[in-house]
Structures are given as C-alpha cells and as structure tokens.
C-alpha cells in the first residue's frame, strides 16, 4: 500500500514537472519570438533612417518567375518590355521651344548715325543682319499700392433749378473683401505661397517686411479663411458634386493638428480626407475634406447615396458602405513584403517570394498600360488574375512564427484578399491606390512646414484651398492665375454662372492655362 502511494506521488510530481517544463518552453518560445520581432523592428527602423527609401527591386536579383515552372500559367504571357537606362541628347531647338512659351521682351541695340560712318570712306553703313542673344529675366514679386478713384458727377443745372440733383458715378466691380486692402492678386499670391509652395505665413510676413511693407500674418490668415469659406466655397461644393458623378473614386487620408477645436486637446489629431477621380475622367477633381477624427462614419457619409468603385487602403471604414465596391491596394501588400525582405535580405525567404508575386503583377500592369479599358480587362483575366490567385494559394500554405514582418505581410494580404481581387472586375480600375497617395502628398508636404491649423475654420479653409489648387493642376491650369481669376470674378457673378468658372470650362481665360 505504501509503495502504491509513493508511486502515485512520483507520477503526480512528474506530471507537474512536465507541465512546468512545457510552460517554460512556451515562455522561452514566446520570448524568442518577441526578441526576433524587436530585432526586425530595429533593423527596419535603421533601414528607413539610413537606407534607400525606394521600393524598386534590384534587377539583378533572381525571382521565382525566372525559373522554369512545370504547368506554368505564365508560359503564354506577352513578351515583357526590357527597361534600360538611356541618356537622350537635347533635341536641336529645344531651348527655343521652351523660350517661345514665355512672354518676349526685345531690347534693340543699334548704332547711332554718327557711329555708323564707315571708318574708311565715311559713308553711312547699311544694316545687313541682327545678332541675337537669349536670356531669361526674373521679376520678383512686388507689393504695389493701388488706389481706385471713382469720379462722381452732378448736374449743375438741376442743382440750380430743381429740388433734386442727379449724381452719377461708375459702378465698380465688387471687391474680394469689402473694406479690406486685400486684392484678389494679393490673396491669390498668399494662398499659392502657402498651399502650393508650402511657405508658412510667418516667413511670408518676413519676406513682405524686406520689401518695406508690413502685412500681419494674422491678417493674411483671416483673408484666406474669409475667401475660402465665402467665395471659393461655391466652387468647392460644385467640385464635390462633379466628383460624385463619377463611377470610380480614389480615397486616402492623413492627420492634421488643430489647436483650437471644441472639446479636444490641442495635441489630439484631426483628419483630412481626400477623394479624387481616376484615369477615366475627362474632368479630374481632387477633393479634400476636414473632419475632427478618423472615424468610419466620415467616408460613409461622404459616399452615402453614391454607387461605384472606391480605391482605398485597408481601412475598414470603407468596407460596409452600401453600393460601394472597395478596390484594395496591391502597393500596400508589396510594401509590407518589401519591408520584410529588407530585414532578411534572403533570396529564398517567404518575404522574397511574396515580393516577387507583387512585382510580377505590377510588371504585367505596365505592359497593359497602353491598352483600352476593355483590352486591359481581358489581359488581366488571362494573365494577372491567375498570378494573384496563385499568390493567395501560396500565402495560405506559409507557416511562419507570429509577429514577424513577413507574417504580418501575409496576414494583411489574406485579410484584404476580398478587396484586392476586385481590381479584376473592371478595366478602368488600377492595381494600387497610388493615385490618391500622390494627391495627399502635397498636403503632407505643407503640414511639415506650417505644422498645424489654429482653428477649425482654418482647417476647413486649407481643405478648400488644396481642392482648388490641386484640381487646377490636374486640369493643366496655372494655380495662381486661376485663383486670382476666381477671386476677381466670384464677387460679381450669380450662382447660375459657377459652371463657367470650373477648371475644365472653355470660358476660362487663356492666361489661366499652362502652355502645351
């Protein structure tokens, strides 16, 4: 009986010991995985800080598509273009072609009659030709005092012989801001400097001081907010209406700090949302909208009642909007595999295999770039879609420890599979959301310089200003000239005439258009 009890105790102790050993082994495995995770984060941080930021893959590296594959789905693919670096000499006459787009100022250099006397016989010498020398001349911005003097007239006869004396004066165009010294050109210049050249208002204030005039930065900010929320808002609303008439929209967002926002600390982030048209649009629009946060209801409200395809990143706020088909971004997938490959740099790693699949899709897409939308749809069905399906089959088969960069890349791709495959539904769609990312970049560049908005109205004004400027650029207009035209015209037009002021309108003056 005693031996039985002793044996039972030993078995229980062994069981407890085995459980404890298993727990310790699990702890060691978890800690090892955590260490690998932090090592990857450190390597990636160092690479982003000191390494090359480009996502281009080394052309000399082998890819899984360069090996012969049995039953390869790629056997009958179109021959790929070979990209080579070439250097093209400047075409003869290129300088004259560029100079012909600029206003011409001619300075004549002629000899007087006395200077043209022949040194041998004294006769007057005749002209046989003209030597020319071309230069470009820069005229810095100038601040000029403009005074409008409106002459007033009365009838002397009526003044002498009648109870009423008629008084006449010319009806002047309405000013951009009544009672202010700010002109349309001044406000357009300030807006172009801040939102196009990313120049903070305090630097612009200093630049004005160097010219001998003091314009307070607060005054400049007030002018911009006033014209944006009163005059330019009419064009802004019309651009939104035109945007939502398209079947394909691209969307992205970025943060903005607003110091004086109701019920929020100055340190909290607000958001700028971007919605823009795609490659199929004849009236391109880049529309920016300020919102106090990044909640899902903002894209839901913006796209409410709209039906079509929306290119977006992996943000879940787009995924449950009625009648909206979300198109995922393969560039985001590629970026995650590229980051994982930069950490390992192993040619046989899952990160490299996933990167090769993504590269293959983008390589095929470049070959389809000159096709019609219908032709691109058919080519994708035949060549690109099988590559994407094979990629997801491979991704499901990969078994990697969690928390590693490549594991996160695979998980992201599988979670986004439904929306990533939607690119094959229509030939007008694109493989990435880079079009939206390029449009959000000007705002990000500006934010790095002027850092924040002081008020909610300031943030809304910034959204309106970027909408007008970036849409003008998309339509081949000069941003400053277009802004000046709008600010001169809007105080003197009715709402029914707004269509004639749109960036694609044929009624715009030639001075607003970039030379072709």
Image (cartoon, rainbow, N blue to C red):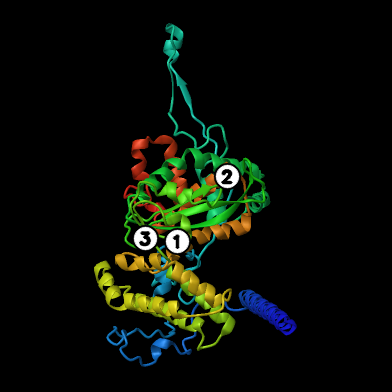
Distance CA(mark 2)–CA(mark 1): 23 Å
Q: Quadrant of the C terminus?
A: bottom left
| Picture disc at residue 436 | 1
Q: Is residue 464 left or right of residue 92?
A: right
Q: Which residue is mark 3?
A: 278
State the residue in front, 349 or 493: 349
* In-front residue for pair 206/292: 292
| Residue 184: mark | none
Q: Is residue 408 above or below residue 463?
A: below
Disc 2 residue crowd, few under 14, some 14–19, many 20+, Cα 10 Å: many
Q: Position of residue 297 (x, y in %)?
A: 47, 48
Determine whether 311 is above or below 504 in the image. below
Q: Earlier in the sequence, mark 2 or mark 1?
A: 1
Any part of residue 97 in sight:
yes
Residue at x 38% of width, y 69% of height: 431
Query: 16 or 491: nearer the eye?
Result: 16
């Amino acid at each position: 009986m005693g031996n039985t009890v002793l044996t039972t105790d030993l078995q229980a102790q062994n069981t407890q010991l085995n459980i404890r050993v298993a727990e310790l082994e699990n702890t060691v495995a978890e800690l090892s995985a955590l260490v690998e995770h932090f090592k990857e984060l450190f390597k990636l941080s160092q690479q982003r800080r000191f390494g090359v930021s480009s996502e281009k893959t080394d052309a000399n590296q082998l890819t899984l598509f360069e090996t012969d594959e049995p039953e390869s789905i790629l056997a009958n693919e179109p021959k790929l273009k070979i990209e080579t670096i070439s250097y093209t000499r400047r075409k003869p006459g290129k300088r004259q072609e560029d100079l012909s787009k600029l206003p011409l100022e001619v300075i004549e250099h002629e000899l007087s009659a006395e200077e043209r006397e022949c040194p041998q016989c004294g006769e007057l010498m005749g002209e046989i030709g003209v030597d020319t020398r071309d230069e470009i001349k820069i005229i810095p911005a100038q601040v000029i005092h403009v005074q409008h003097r409106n002459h007033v007239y009365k009838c002397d006869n009526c003044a002498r012989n009648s109870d009423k004396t008629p008084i006449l004066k010319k009806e002047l165009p309405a000013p951009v801001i009544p009672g202010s010294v700010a002109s349309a050109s001044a406000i357009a210049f300030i807006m172009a400097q801040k939102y196009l050249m990313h120049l903070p208002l305090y630097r612009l204030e200093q630049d004005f001081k160097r010219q001998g005039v003091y314009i307070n930065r607060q005054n400049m900010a007030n002018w911009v907010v006033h014209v944006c929320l009163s005059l330019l808002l009419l064009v802004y609303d019309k651009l939104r209406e035109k945007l939502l008439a398209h079947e394909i929209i691209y969307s992205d967002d970025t943060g903005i700090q607003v110091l004086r926002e109701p019920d929020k600390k100055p340190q909290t982030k607000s958001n700028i949302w971007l919605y823009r048209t795609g490659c199929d649009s004849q009236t391109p629009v880049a529309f920016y909208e300020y919102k106090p946060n990044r909640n899902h209801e903002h894209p839901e409200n913006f796209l409410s009642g709209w039906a079509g395809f929306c290119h977006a990143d992996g943000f879940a706020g787009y995924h449950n909007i009625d009648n909206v088909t979300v198109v995922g971004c393969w560039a985001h997938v590629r970026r995650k595999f590229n980051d994982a490959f930069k950490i390992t740099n192993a040619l046989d790693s899952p990160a490299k295999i996933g990167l090769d699949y993504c590269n293959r899709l983008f390589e095929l897409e470049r070959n389809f770039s000159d096709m019609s939308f219908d032709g691109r749809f058919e080519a994708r069905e035949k060549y690109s879609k099988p590559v994407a399906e094979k990629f997801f089959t491979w991704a499901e088969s990969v078994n990697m420890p969690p928390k590693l960069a490549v594991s996160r890349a695979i998980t992201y791709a599988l979670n986004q599979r439904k929306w990533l495959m939607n690119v094959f539904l229509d030939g007008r769609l694109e493989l990435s959301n880079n079009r939206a990312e390029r449009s959000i970049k000007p705002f990000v560049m500006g934010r790095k310089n002027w850092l924040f908005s002081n008020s909610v109205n300031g943030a809304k004004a910034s959204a309106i200003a970027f909408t007008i400027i970036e849409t003008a650029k998309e339509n081949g207009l000069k941003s400053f000239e277009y802004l000046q035209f709008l600010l001169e015209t809007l105080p003197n037009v009715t709402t029914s005439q707004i269509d004639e002021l749109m960036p694609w309108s044929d009624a715009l003056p030639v001075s607003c258009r970039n030379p072709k």
